[in-house]
Amino acid sequence: MQRRNLLKTAAAVAAAFSFSLAHAAYPERPITLVVPWGAGGGTDQTARIIGTLLEKDLGQPVNVVNRTGGSGVVGHAAIAEANPDGYTIGMITVEITMMHHTGLTKLNQSNYTPLSLMNMDPAGVNVRADSPYKNVNDVLTAIKNNPGKFKSSGTGQGGIWHLALAGMLNSNRIPADASPWVPSQGAAPGLNDLMAGGVEFVTCSLPEARALIEAGKVRPLAIMSDTPDKIFPNVPTLKAATGSNWTVGAWRGMAGPKGMPTEATARLSASFKKIFDSKEFQDFMNQRGFGLLYMAPAQQAAFMESGSKGMGDVMKAVGLAK
């Protein structure tokens, strides 16, 4: 009897040990981190520093892959439709709370396992340095007096920077479509089009335009935030410049497909909190002027749910929702 009990005890210990090893094993192989936007933009830059630090923390390779197209739909779909085993994750963006309102996709925030929010950047209004527009009121006046003449860009049709422009115009009693939108695969291509003369205005975050601003090629005229930018404090807020209360920003968060294993979710969310708090990440973001905002998974989920409703209301008001 005693021997039998000892054998049972040994078996139980072995089973518990095996269970512990199984749960400690994640990750056992490389992880793919999908970025729904093009190389060089703020989302790509943020995802790549996170990928580098995640690789160090997990001890496995993290392969960052840009999956562009469909105004962000292609990359977001690649994340949502991946095997929910924890080995394909991605950086989802504010567009996931918007795209379904425009009819671009049925995907929304409920199709993901939230892992953390890492960043928030308000929209800015940018022109070429040699443009005749010296302030944002000049831009608004030009668009109001010449509807349909001056083009804008910065992201895909119905994307966050498109909504930023539409909301800015709407808040200043100008038709939301008075400046035709030229879709692009992100801020970097939009800014390239600005420099080439294909568009007159680009709405995107100031960090995304920073290199061109500091090179004296692009002039920022306003920021759609309650407070000035920490890197460009002399750029006025939209409210200070025009009296408009319109504010809007892009956020970036980490997520995986819906239904990920608990152990993978817990391990990844802990890593992202560690990364967010690290000096390397804080320095990287601050040096580029990227906004720092962390939310744990539960808070991120509630934030996205609320954001989806708010975006839907705004998009309906400016005629972008179907």
Image (tube, grey):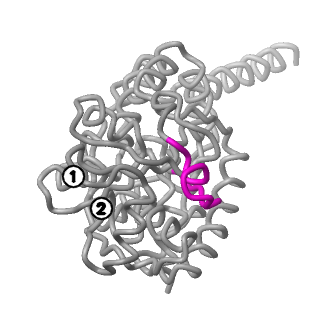
Q: Which of 180 and 276 is in front in this view?
A: 180
Circle 1 residue: 189
Position of residue 118 in the picture relative to residue 12 (left or right) = left
Instruction: Judge whether residue 174 is colored magenta.
Output: no
Viewer-proximal residue among 47 and 165: 165
Magenta residues span 236-249
Extreme residue in the left direction: 196
Q: Indicate the quadrant where residue 89 lies.
A: top left
Provide residue 155's location: percent of width, then percent of height. 33, 59
Q: Is residue 130 left or right of residue 32?
A: left
Answer yes or no: is residue 129 visible: yes
Residue 254 visible in the shown view: no
> Residue at label 2?
153
Q: How far across and down, in percent of the image, does residue 260 sit? A: 56, 49
Say which element carries label 1. helix
The mark total stands at 2
Say if 19 sits above or below 17 in the image: below
Q: What residue type is labelled 1?
A: Pro
Instruction: Please report the residue visible at 74 percent of the width from the left and 24 percent of the height from the top.
Output: 12
Q: Which amino acid does label 2 sit on?
A: Ser
